[in-house]
Amino acid sequence: MATLTHRTYGTVVGILGSPNAGKTAAIVSLYLLLATNKLSGYEFRDSQTLMALEQISRGARRWSEHNPPSEFTTHTELPSERLAGFIHLRIERIQDSKRADLLLPDLPGEWSEQLIDSNRVDRLEFLKGADAIWIMVDGLEMANDETRQHTRHRMAMLLERIAVFLSPRVPPITVVVTRRDKGVLPPHAFANLFDDASHRGISIRLIQIASFSEDDAVAPGSGLSELLDGLLVVEPVSIAFWPDATDHGGERQLLKFRSVHS
């Protein structure tokens, strides 16, 4: 990915979740639908990370109807053990011509696992300046009676870690249940969990998405427009993609990353 020197206003999203939760798939689906003018209500305007987007979407481009690839995306790995890499998408909402520069981190799921298990936060400092957080949850695990409770418990632990780490300012959180085409989220799947977050003063909502779909009744990209709608109500902060050498401020940085097969 080319070094970015463009200075802009960006909406920074923290994207967390287990290794198979569908984080990269959501980014890839957003990009492919926007690039082909197929995302309802939105249009693609620009990206400063096109090479990175093309790389992580390579598997999905091989997708043909009734013959999907074994993996739509590759396992995310970063060249630095300690630094996050970001994807940039400039979008425009058709109904009001509102534009936003989205900065979406493509993080290994292991970082979220280590946040839960050992409270490792040094690599997630950027969350303190995030405008919103998406917690991705595998819809297959939530639809399965045998795995639902464990997945829900892990998500509750992740919420707890985030609340403590980011206190007193926790940005709005969206729990994104993926793979909507694979199963229906049971009623009250997150009973009491959101109430607990609300008592902590955390704003939280739930959205189900299907980044891709093998079910004719569920369109690829279902739920993604609603996910973006939630971002266009936050006030973005001014950042430098890559600060000048003379700039010693505390602005965020976009760093090189790569996505390779595990």
Image (spheres, rainbow, N blue to C red):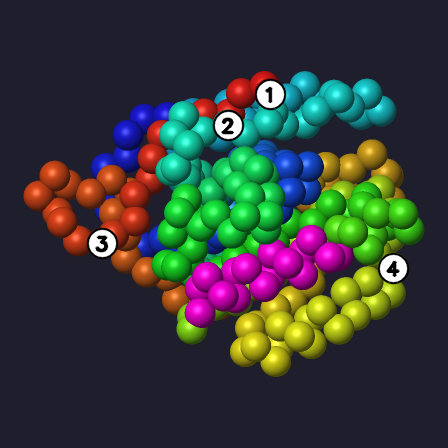
| Amino acid on which disc 4 is placed | Pro
Q: Is residue 217 left or right of residue 8?
A: right
Give the residue displayed 30% in from the left and 43% down from the top.
253
Q: Is residue 226 above or below residue 16?
A: below
- The residue stretch that appears in magenta: 152-167
Q: Is residue 74 left or right of residue 240?
A: right
Mark earlier in primary sequence (3, 2): 2
Kindly report the distance in space between the C-alpha atoms of the residues bearing marks 3 and 4: 44 Å
Q: Classify mark 4: residues with Cα within 10 Å, few (<14), some (14-19) or many (20+).
A: few
Element under label 1? Answer: loop
Residue farthest along the left direction in this orientation: 246
Foreground label between 1 and 4: 1
Kindly report the distance in space between the C-alpha atoms of the residues bearing marks 1 and 2: 8 Å
Kindly report the distance in space between the C-alpha atoms of the residues bearing marks 1 and 4: 32 Å
Q: Is residue 133 above or below residue 34?
A: below
Residue identified by numbered label 4: 186
Residue 77 — which label?
A: 2
Element under label 3? Answer: loop
Q: Position of residue 107 (x, y in %)?
A: 51, 38
Q: Is residue 159 above or below residue 44?
A: below
Residue identified by numbered label 3: 250
Residue 262 — which label?
A: 1
Mark earlier in primary sequence (4, 2): 2
Give the residue displayed 87% in from the left and 65% down from the top.
187
Q: Are marks 1 and 3 in contact (CB under 8 Å)?
A: no
Q: Position of residue 204 (x, y in %)?
A: 61, 68
